[in-house]
Amino acid sequence: MSIAENGKPTRFGPDWPGRRCGATTRSGTPCKKAALKGRARCRNHGGCATGPRTEAGRARIVAAQLKHGRLTKERRAEAKRRAEVGREIRAELRDIAARAVAYGWLDPDWKDQFD
Ligand SMILES: [Zn+2]
């Protein structure tokens, strides 16, 4: 065993190239164990956990992760749709204004009247 920055011995030495568990222990020090293969945590700190299995469990996790709902997939899709509608309306208005100018119903510099 060798000594880490916190003065406590580490399991595989400070220069061990493997991935360590990223958990904080109950005493506040970082966990010294190696993380499980393909995971960020050791066996003691949830490395074996596979997440919620049941539909109710998944719903509970979603509810716990949701802060305000402003950036949900549905809200972002709706904002995108509204932006597209706005672009279509502005394009149609541009087209109408161009035709009105072409027919002489509007001055070519009609937009300057609104400064
Ligand atoms: Zn750990």
Image (cartoon, rainbow, N blue to C red):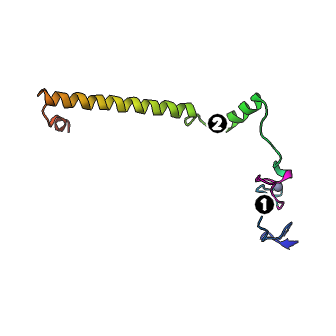
Q: Which dot, 2 or 1, sits closer to the camera?
A: 1
Question: Between residues 99 and 27, which one lies in front from this camera angle?
Answer: 99
Determine which residue is flagged by label 2: 66
Q: Position of residue 91 (x, y in %)?
A: 30, 32
Q: Position of residue 110 (x, y in %)?
A: 16, 34
User: Upstream in the sequence, badge 2 or badge 1?
Assistant: 1
Q: Residue at x 17, y 38 (%)?
A: 112
Q: Which residues are magenta?
A: 32-43
Horizontal side of residue 42 vs 107, given as left or right: right
The answer to which quarter of the image holds residue 90 is top left
Q: Position of residue 72 (x, y in %)?
A: 58, 34
Question: Between residues 16 and 60, which one lies in front from this camera angle?
Answer: 16
Q: What kind of secondary structure does the magenta stretch mostly adopt?
A: loop
Tell me the amino acid under the disc marked 1: Arg
Q: Quadrant of the C terminus?
A: top left
Q: Is mark 1 within 8 Å of ligand 1?
A: no
Q: Residue at x 78, y 63 (%)?
A: 18
Determine which residue is flagged by label 1: 20
Q: Residue furthest bottom?
A: 2
The answer to which quarter of the image holds residue 66 is top right
Tell me the amino acid under the disc marked 2: Leu
Q: Residue at x 49, y 30 (%)?
A: 78
Q: Is mark 2 within 8 Å of ligand 1?
A: no
Q: Identify the secondary structure beneath mark 1.
A: loop
Q: Residue at x 41, y 32 (%)?
A: 84
Around disc 2, counting alpha carbons within 10 Å, would you say few (fewer than 14), some (14 to 19), or many (20 or more)? few
Q: Identify the secondary structure beneath mark 2.
A: loop
Question: Compared with residue 112, is residue 11 higher up or lower down, i.e. above or below?
Answer: below
